[in-house]
Image (cartoon, grey):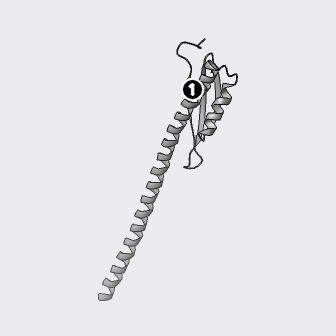
Amino acid sequence: MPMLNQRNRERAEGSAAVASIALVAAAALALSLALAVGNIVVSRSHARGVADLAALAAATEWNYYGHRAPCEIAQRVAAQNNANATACEIHGSSIQVTIEVSTSAGAWVVDATARAGPASGPVT
């Protein structure tokens, strides 16, 4: 009879090891998922900031300095901030810019759009 108790104890210890390995794996997966979501949120915020900056720079050049290619300014500002201007539209005295930012959490890309221009039209 003592031999059966020893065998049962070894089985119980083995199953505890398997359960603890599964628990550690689940915790690692949850942490990885949380980090990926966090990175996407941070990248989205970065994209919004770059879109605002690019639109403001392009609108300033367009309205105040007479630059004839404000979308080039927007693309340059985006590139200097590790982003890509995917769309740039001129709406009278306003400039609308769409920015894409790649995340480090895989192959995801986030985008943001901003529009800037004078409140009452171009300054003369």
Residue 13, placed above or below residue 121: below
Callout 1, which amino acid? Leu
Residue 67, given in percent of the width and then of the height, sits at 68, 22
| Residue 14: x %, y % from top left | 39, 75
Residue 1 appears in view: no
Left or right: 10, with 83 as reference point: left
Q: Residue at x 49, y 42 (%)?
A: 42
The front one of 22 and 124 is 124
Give me the residue at 66% from left, 25% from top.
70
Q: How many marks?
A: 1
Quarter of the view holding residue 68: top right
Q: Which residue is mark 1?
A: 56
Left or right placement of residue 103 versus residue 19 in this view: right
Disc 1 is placed on an element classified as helix
Quadrant (top left/top right/bottom left/bottom right) for the C terminus: top right
| Residue closest to the eye, 53 or 27 | 53
Q: Which percent across, then down, holds residue 95? A: 61, 23
Q: Residue at x 37, y 77 (%)?
A: 11
Task: Relative to 10, say whether 86 is above or below.
Answer: above
